[in-house]
């Protein structure tokens, strides 16, 4: 089974639609389902549509921890679905805070960060994130909407720096040139071993 927490309703419905697109059946809940509901599920994917993206960091624990402590944590894949514009900050919707919560709740290993959704016009290249605007594509910190967002204005497009500003330590990148290298698998294993 795959389980995910979506940091807003719209993104959660899109995540479920993407799983469906690849032939997986799923169900979306508005709160963490109880253990009996999870055990009885015959779905491939269980999603929880949350509101963490709009919360002050201090309020996020009550929203996220029940998901992390539920029996969904035993899923083969566990995803924290962020908005594909990565709009978060140290004070609102902090992705960094979610990483700290997950570590505190015993989750180990690397946490891959994959916010790009090309079919929505969202792209990541060399750790920099871009979004479509009109007929063009703009870096997030130059995107007219995201750079001037009322609660989480993006002043940086390099996601490594965005995460570091939210307190995430050990951020690393594996770019397209490494993916295409002959020793890509060995390099990826070495990077994963550092638990970035």
Image: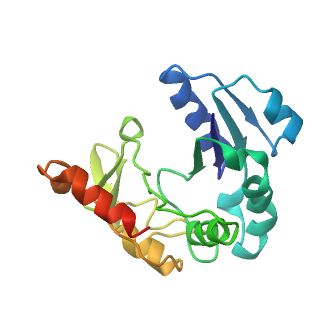
Q: Position of residue 119 (x, y in %)?
A: 38, 35
Viewer-side residue, 195 vs 113: 195
Residue at 63% x, 33% y is 1
Residue at 73% x, 50% y is 50
- When asked about the image quadrant of residue 25, the answer is top right
Asked if residue 119 is positioned above or below residue 70 in the image, the reply reads: above
- When asked about the image quadrant of residue 129, the answer is bottom left
Q: How many marks?
A: 0
Q: Residue furthest top?
A: 23
Q: Position of residue 57 (x, y in %)?
A: 70, 73
| Left or right: 190 as drawn, with respect to 155 | left
Residue 175 in view of the camera: no
Q: Quadrant of the C terminus?
A: bottom left
Viewer-side residue, 110 vs 148: 110
Residue at 56% x, 37% y is 15
Viewer-side residue, 131 vs 67: 67
Asked if residue 94 is positioned above or below residue 3 in the image, the reply reads: below
Q: Position of residue 87 (x, y in %)?
A: 52, 62
Residue at 57% x, 66% y is 95
Asked if residue 160 is positioned above or below residue 110 in the image, the reply reads: below
Viewer-side residue, 91 vs 137: 91
């Amino acid at each position: 089974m795959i389980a995910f927490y979506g940091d807003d309703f719209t993104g959660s419905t899109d995540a479920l639609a993407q799983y469906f697109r690849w032939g997986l059946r799923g169900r979306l809940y508005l709160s963490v389902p109880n253990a009996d509901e999870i055990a009885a599920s015959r779905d491939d994917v269980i999603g929880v549509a949350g509101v963490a993206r709009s919360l002050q960091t201090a309020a996020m624990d009550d929203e996220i921890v029940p998901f992390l402590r539920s029996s969904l944590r035993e899923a083969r894949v566990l995803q924290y679905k962020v908005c594909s514009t990565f709009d978060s900050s140290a004070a609102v919707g902090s992705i960094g805070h979610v990483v700290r919560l997950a570590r505190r709740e015993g989750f180990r290993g690397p946490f891959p960060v994959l916010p790009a959704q090309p079919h929505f016009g969202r792209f990541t290249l060399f750790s920099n994130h871009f979004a479509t605007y009109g007929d063009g594509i703009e870096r997030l910190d130059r995107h007219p909407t995201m750079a001037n967002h009322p609660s989480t204005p993006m002043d940086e497009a390099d996601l490594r720096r965005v995460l570091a500003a939210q307190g995430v330590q050990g951020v690393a990148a594996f770019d397209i040139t490494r993916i295409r290298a002959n020793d890509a698998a060995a390099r990826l294993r070495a990077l994963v071993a550092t638990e970035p």
